[in-house]
């Protein structure tokens, strides 16, 4: 372990040069990293698919995350685990074998402003289109340039963040979150076939819906359905469940947060308090 000011990455690291790296972000609540095992399993699965070597097991990474929280004496924390392919190779061609670069960081969690949960976020539909065939989208890589451009686009247009639509016209996800809508008390989220990251929080929300007899489906749908929805909300591990107030300056629903969104916000919050430090995971 080293202090942040002493941390350094080689200028030849492929994660720095080409975005040839994957990562996970999550929160700890009262010293309990929420859904840690699920995040680690996704990281390891992506590493295997993208052929990024790692000498560590999920169990070893879990112990390292817990130890770092203890050393830093953090309870409510932001946690990031980054795994790069490391150095080597000729240009874009990666080396057949290489020592990967792994680092884990945490810091005190800075929550989103309460005002956003009460009044909702202002979103736009980005002009940037997602490919329907890009296999990298299913993995949480460090290449976020398109998302950065979309966020800048949203700010220029008076929004706070952006929604991606793919080249077939189907809604995918946001810059750093998954998206849901409510139609006639039914929760709908884009199908993975739209080409989007299968978020851990997305899976949690779908399971909560199933446990509470709330119909939830995964579908392909155009952005026009979002504009006509009764409610829209977005999710990720840091923001949890966040209501949406407007899309392209068009008001969503009649109340923020909507009835079902509020229920899911409350259910998710309770769940973060109930998962034990170790043992069985929720998913």
Image (tube, helix red, strand yellow):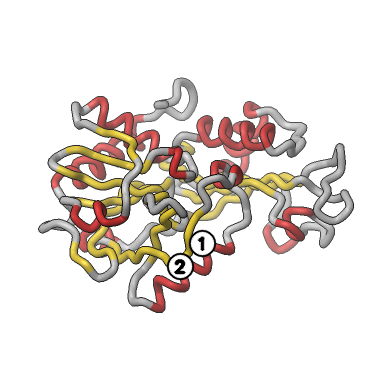
**Which residue is labeled 2 in the image?**
151
The image shows residue 233 at horizontal and vertical percentages of 28, 51
Seen from the viewer's position, the closer of residues 193 and 104 is 193
Q: Which mark is residue 136?
A: none
Q: Image height check: is 213 above or below 153?
A: above
Seen from the viewer's position, the closer of residues 42 and 128 is 128
Seen from the viewer's position, the closer of residues 233 and 166 is 166
**Which residue is labeled 1 in the image?**
147
The image shows residue 36 at horizontal and vertical percentages of 51, 35
Q: Is residue 73 visible?
A: no
Extreme residue toward the top, this view: 280
Extreme residue toward the front, this view: 168
Q: Quadrant of the C terminus?
A: top left
Residue 42 relative to residue 156: left or right:
right
How far separated are the C-alphas under marks 2 and 1?
6 Å
Q: How many marks can you see?
A: 2
The image shows residue 216 at horizontal and vertical percentages of 26, 33
Q: Residue at x 53, y 66 (%)?
A: 148
Q: Quadrant of residue 43?
A: top right
Q: Is residue 161 visible?
A: yes
Q: Residues within 10 Å of mark 1 (few under 14, many from 20)?
A: some
Is there a contact, CB below 8 Å, between mark 2 and mark 1?
Answer: yes
């Amino acid at each position: 372990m080293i202090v942040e000011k002493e941390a350094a990455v080689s200028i030849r690291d492929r994660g720095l040069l080409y975005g040839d790296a994957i990562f996970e972000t999550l929160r700890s609540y009262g010293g309990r990293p929420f859904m840690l095992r699920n995040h680690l399993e996704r990281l390891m699965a992506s590493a295997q698919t993208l052929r990024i070597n790692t000498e560590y097991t999920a169990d070893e990474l879990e112990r390292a995350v817990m130890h770092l929280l203890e050393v830093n004496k953090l309870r409510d924390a932001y946690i990031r685990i980054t795994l790069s392919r490391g150095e080597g190779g000729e240009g874009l061609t990666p080396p057949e074998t290489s020592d990967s670069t792994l680092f884990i960081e945490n810091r005190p969690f800075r929550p989103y402003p309460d005002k956003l949960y009460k009044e909702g976020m202002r979103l736009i539909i980005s002009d940037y289109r997602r490919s329907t065939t890009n296999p990298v989208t299913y993995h949480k890589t460090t290449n976020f340039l398109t998302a950065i451009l979309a966020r800048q686009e949203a700010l220029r247009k008076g929004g706070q963040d952006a929604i991606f639509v793919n080249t077939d016209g189907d809604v995918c996800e946001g810059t750093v979150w998954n998206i849901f809508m409510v139609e006639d008390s039914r929760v709908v989220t884009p199908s993975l076939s739209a080409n989007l990251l299968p978020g851990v929080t997305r899976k949690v929300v779908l399971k909560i819906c199933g446990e509470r007899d709330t119909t939830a489906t995964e579908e392909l749908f155009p952005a026009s359905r979002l504009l006509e929805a009764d409610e829209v909300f977005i999710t990720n591990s840091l923001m949890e469940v966040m209501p949406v107030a407007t899309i392209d300056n068009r008001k969503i629903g009649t109340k923020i947060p909507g009835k079902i969104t509020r229920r899911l916000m409350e259910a998710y919050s309770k769940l973060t308090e109930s998962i034990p430090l170790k043992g069985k995971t929720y998913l």
